[in-house]
Image (cartoon, rainbow, N blue to C red):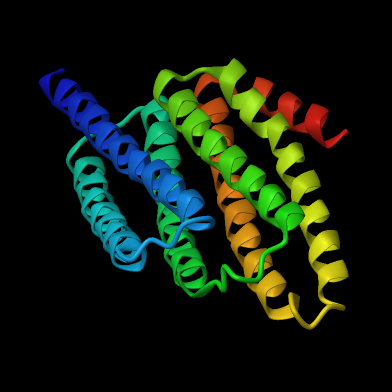
Amino acid sequence: MAGATVFRSSLRRLEAAALDSLESVDEQLARLLGSLRVPDAELVHAVRAGSRRIAAVRANINRELLQVIASGRPSVAELRVVAAVFDLLACMARMGERCAAAAHITAKLDRLRTDEGLCQTVERIGALTEAQVHGAREAFGARDARLADEVIRRNQRVGILARRAFERATWLGADPRFDDWAIELLRVAGSFEQTADDAVEIAEQALVLVIEPFEEMAYVDQRAG
């Protein structure tokens, strides 16, 4: 009994550490959004450092989770939490890497060549992505199925905005004043969109933790239909 209590306590602690680290992705996204308009001299260094911290946290929690599993006798429900935390960590690491890649791009953007329409669309994608990451984190931590489902469904808006950005960038590509700039900004939009997709994956893991296995299968079938 004491071993089971220690296992649950360790699992809660490691999940909390993962969610705390995920919060740093919010901070990186906010800084990236600000850098689209105003150059941030420390952006690349700060985001790269954040990405390295996320990778280190992931490695440490992965190792501790494996040790906890080996030392205890987890229930099926607890194993589902372990699997969900492993997936959250993988998503978080990808988010950190994408933020670092986007930071390199925004640091080199030529702000003398701008198109307000494309800028606004990419900023909206970034702001919505930031909301998606925050929502997924809250849904996972609170085991909030309603919020998780909201994050999943809201991601359609990210896709719509991404297509709008692509269409605008394609149109701008015909103008030599904007072609390179538009392509670079589109790459930033792509990083935001992929980060939003990872937020959806975290929200889906939150649903896994609150939906019974048979209900989960029915839910997946319903969404597929």
- Locate residue 109 relative to residue 93 in the image: left or right: right
Vertical placement of residue 14 versus 2, above or below: below
Is any atom of residue 211 visible in this view?
no
Observer-nearest residue: 175 or 188? Answer: 175
Q: Residue at x 65, y 61 (%)?
A: 190
Quadrant housing the C terminus: top right
Is any atom of residue 113 visible in this view?
yes
Looking at the image, the residue that sits furthest to the left is 2
Quadrant of the image occupied by residue 81? top left
Vertical placement of residue 181 versus 90, above or below: below
Quadrant housing the N terminus: top left
Q: Where is residue 8 in the image (x, y as percent from the top left)?
A: 24, 25
Q: Residue at x 58, y 20 (%)?
A: 147
Q: Residue at x 69, y 38 (%)?
A: 155
- Locate residue 111 relative to residue 34 in the image: left or right: right
Q: Position of residue 136 (x, y in %)?
A: 51, 32
Q: Where is residue 194 in the image (x, y as percent from the top left)?
A: 61, 55
Observer-nearest residue: 121 or 86? Answer: 121
